Amino acid sequence: MTSAAELADCLIRDWPVSTEGEAYLTALMMCDAVLSGGEDDTPEHAREAFIEAAYEAGSSVLDDSNGPDF
């Protein structure tokens, strides 16, 4: 995934577990803030929140080199 829009799409359409976790909700709100043009919110913040949500869900995230990214 290369954009906040893709992260949000994954959170909304493809999330493998409960969508009630705190990190999940934070990631969703962060993606929305980035997509809405929030001054203090960056795509990197959305990415970090997404990784935390994946960790909360018991999943891992692979970076561009296919290694673990925690």
Image (spheres, grey):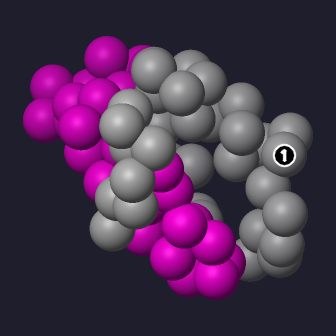
Q: Which stretch is magenta?
A: 33-62
- Relative to 38, 29 lies left or right: right
Residue 57 in magenta stretch = yes
- Relative to 23, 13 lies left or right: right
User: Which quadrant holds the C terminus?
Assistant: bottom left
Residue 54 in magenta stretch = yes
Q: In this view, does 12 lie above or below 54?
A: above
Q: Residue 27, image x and y in percent? A: 49, 55
Which quadrant of the structure image shows residue 9?
A: top right
Q: In this view, does 50 lie above or below 35?
A: below
The residue tagged with tag 1: helix, strand or loop?
helix
Q: 29 or 6, which lies in front?
A: 6
Q: Residue 31, image x and y in percent? A: 47, 37
Q: Residue 5, image x and y in percent? A: 56, 21
Q: Residue at x 22, y 31 (%)?
A: 42
Q: Which residue is drawn at 79% across and 55% down?
A: 15
Q: Residue 68, image x and y in percent? A: 40, 61
User: Which quadrant holds the N terminus?
Assistant: top right
Q: Residue at x 38, y 33 (%)?
A: 64
Which quadrant of the structure image shows residue 65?
A: top left
Q: 26 or 9, which lies in front?
A: 9
- Relative to 21, 39 lies left or right: left
- Residue assigned mark 1: 14
Q: Given the image, on which type of amino acid does mark 1 rest?
A: Asp
